Image: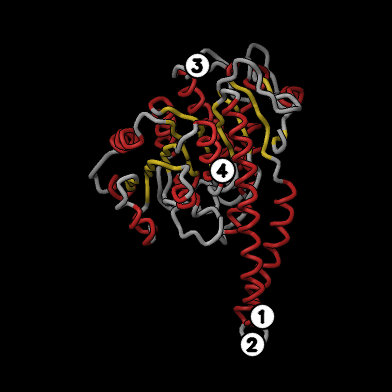
């Protein structure tokens, strides 16, 4: 598989600190081989996307590239017990975006310098603004290149009968995940997104804020529901999209006002998505105070987000799940705390998927 960079089983074992009388997931989980073949009997494949190109292309704070390794380390140290069947979970590895990430980092530095110069005014301001526009356009081209790699890897894993649980990167990767699932299923898929934002910004070039706009326009997204949308950050495009009967938003503000509770939001999202193939998206920036590219001052609690993950994974026909936008170092939490939350979400989703009968 061209764009999959596997993790060797030996690396999983080496990264796992054992303890007498206990068994950790890292001691039990298998890995894809060097050619990207999924181990027989795999139901869930853990996949990383170590990039922050889409966040940079959205003029956001980079850092999401670090989430994959931090979360994998925490996941490997979770207990393998009767509540989770580690034999059905494999670590696929990471989508190889190293070359794109390097170019994006250099372009982003140049973009920041050009924007500063443009803001100063003077004779060179117009030329600096033009340079900034070109650099931003290049970042968005690089983000689109990641889309195609993610799509290929997701389609490969789905073709092998595994359900990918994707860790890391910006929310731009929702497009590649949806496209890969749609390619494998032969039809558009549905999505439930637990997020303060709808990520339905204009099709102005690819970035972390418009994955679902492109997905709907490209025919890979059918029905879409957002749990936790924050009314004060919803732009006109998001508000307009809600008038589309294929889109539904359950707002955080309605929960705060007591108009609906979270359980009813989940029920409504599941009903809206229906019985067809679906993906689950969980944006870490919906968790109050969690380190993310856009840290939330007020959002859902970790417990509430875990409840969403657990229920959605049991009640939807999940073809992939994605935990996006976690950015170690960009918030008040220690890195280990953020990594543990992401690992807990992975376990919640894996349990839900494994509890359902495989197609």
Asked which quadrant contains residue 191, the reply is: top left
What is the distance, in whole Å, between disc 4 and disc 3 at their CAs? Answer: 31 Å
- List x then y, in percent, for residue 192: 41, 39
Residue annotated with mark 2: 122
- List x then y, in percent, for residue 56: 61, 58
- List x then y, in percent, for residue 7: 72, 29
What is the distance, in whole Å, between disc 4 and disc 2 at their CAs? Answer: 42 Å
What is the distance, in whole Å, between disc 3 and disc 2 at their CAs? Answer: 65 Å
Decide which of tag 3 and tag 2 comes sooner along the chain.
3
Tell which tag, 2 or 1, sits nearer the viewer. 1
User: Residue drawn 52% across and 44% down?
Assistant: 174
In depth, the one of 321 and 276 nearer the eye is 276
Tell which tag, 4 or 2, sits nearer the viewer. 4
Q: Is residue 80 above or below residue 53?
A: above
Q: Secondary structure at mark 1?
A: helix
What is the distance, in whole Å, between disc 2 and disc 1 at their CAs? Answer: 10 Å
Query: Callout 4 environment at 10 Å: few (<14), some (14 to 19), or many (20+)?
Result: many
In depth, the one of 309 and 18 nearer the eye is 309
What is the distance, in whole Å, between disc 1 and disc 3 at their CAs? Answer: 60 Å
* CB-based contact (under 8 Å), mark 1 and mark 3: no
User: Residue drawn 47% across and 40% down?
Assistant: 282
Decide which of tag 4 and tag 3 comes sooner along the chain.
3
Q: Which mark is residue 335?
A: none
User: Residue drawn 52% across and 26% down?
Assistant: 347
Residue annotated with mark 4: 176
């Amino acid at each position: 598989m061209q764009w999959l960079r596997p993790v060797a089983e030996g690396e999983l074992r080496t990264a796992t600190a054992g303890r007498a009388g206990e068994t950790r997931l890292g001691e039990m989980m298998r890995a894809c081989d060097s050619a990207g073949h999924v181990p027989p009997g795999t139901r869930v494949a853990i996949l990383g996307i170590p990039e922050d190109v889409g966040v940079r292309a959205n003029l956001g704070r980079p850092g999401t590239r670090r989430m994959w390794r931090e979360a994998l380390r925490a996941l490997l140290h979770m207990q393998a017990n009767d509540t989770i069947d580690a034999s059905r979970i494999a670590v696929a590895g990471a989508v190889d975006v190293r070359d794109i990430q390097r170019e994006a980092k250099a372009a982003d530095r140049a973009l920041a310098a050009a924007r500063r110069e443009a803001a100063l005014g003077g004779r060179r301001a117009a030329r600096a603004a033009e340079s900034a526009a070109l650099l931003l356009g290049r970042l968005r081209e690089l983000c689109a290149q990641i889309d195609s790699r993610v799509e290929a890897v997701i389609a490969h894993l789905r073709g092998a009968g595994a359900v990918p649980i994707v860790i890391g990167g910006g929310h731009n990767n929702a497009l590649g995940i949806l496209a890969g699932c749609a390619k494998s299923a032969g039809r558009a898929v549905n999505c439930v997104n637990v997020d303060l934002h709808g990520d339905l910004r204009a099709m102005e070039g690819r970035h972390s804020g418009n994955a679902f706009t492109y997905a709907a326009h490209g025919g890979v997204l059918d029905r879409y529901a957002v749990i936790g949308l924050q009314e004060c950050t919803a732009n006109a495009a998001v508000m307009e999209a809600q008038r589309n009967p294929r889109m539904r938003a359950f707002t955080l503000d309605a929960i705060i006002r007591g108009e609906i509770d979270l359980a009813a939001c989940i029920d409504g999202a599941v009903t809206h998505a229906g019985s067809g193939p679906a993906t689950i998206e969980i944006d870490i920036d919906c968790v109050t105070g969690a380190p993310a590219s856009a840290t939330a001052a007020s959002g859902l609690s970790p417990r509430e987000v875990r409840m969403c993950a657990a229920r959605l994974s049991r009640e939807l026909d999940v073809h992939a799940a994605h935990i996006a936008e976690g950015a170690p170092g960009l918030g008040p939490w220690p890195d280990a705390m953020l990594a543990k939350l992401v690992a807990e979400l992975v376990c919640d989703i894996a349990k839900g998927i494994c509890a359902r009968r495989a197609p």
